[in-house]
Image: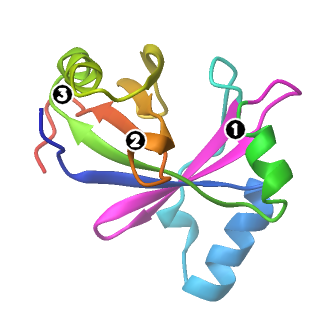
Amino acid sequence: MKLGRLNHVGVAVPSIADALDTYRTLYGVTDADITPIRDMPAQGVRVAFVDVPNSQIELIEPLGETSPILKFLEKNPAGGQHHVCFEVPDIIEARDAMVERGATVLGEPRIGAHGTPIIFVHPKNSNGVLIELMESPKGEEH
């Protein structure tokens, strides 16, 4: 298993609407660069993507009182970089390779915001960075 392309950088925010205002005002993002905001109840987050020429920024906001990003936002009330996501060809192969290599995989594969299976690798295994591994969308070449 080898990392594929950087798919996105996840940024936890208390409000996606406020964060999008910042991206529009400071960085010239237009509405055409932003995906619709949508709820992902199974993940406990609300999400929107900002498209940039070579990747995406995933804005994630807590959805409900049990959201997995609430503790992160307690420590970082203004928000901040939450994770980095890399594509892999096969999520099961990636999970098994991570476990074999001694990494702590958080949970089982589940469907992520791009509609493909994902897993997370504990930050302690990656110099303090939470790594999301995402199965590459089928039919897309990068």
Q: Is residue 4 above or below residue 111?
A: below
In the image, taking residue 123 as reference, residue 19 lies left or right, namely right
- Between disc 1 and disc 2, the foreground one is 2
Magenta region includes residue 138: no
In the image, taking residue 100 as reference, residue 133 lies left or right, namely right
Q: Earlier in the sequence, mark 3 or mark 2?
A: 2
Q: Which residues are magenta?
A: 45-67
Instruction: Look at the numbered disc 3 and give the secondary structure of its residue.
Output: loop
Q: How far apart are the alpha carbons under marks 3 and 2? A: 28 Å
As drawn, the residue found furthest toward the front would be: 102
Q: Amino acid at mark 3?
A: Lys
Q: Amino acid at mark 1?
A: Arg
Viewer-closest of 63 and 70: 70
Cβ atoms at labels 1 and 2 below 8 Å apart: no
Which disc is residue 137 wearing? Answer: none
Which disc is residue 125 wearing? Answer: 2
Which disc is residue 138 wearing? Answer: 3
Tell me the residue at 18%/22% (across/down): 90
Read off the residue under disc 1: 46
Cβ atoms at labels 3 and 2 below 8 Å apart: no
Could you say which quadrant of the image residue 98 lies in?
Answer: top left
Cβ atoms at labels 3 and 1 below 8 Å apart: no
- Crowd class of label 1 (few under 14; some 14 to 19; many from 20; radius 10 Å): many
Q: Position of residue 66 (x, y in %)?
A: 82, 24
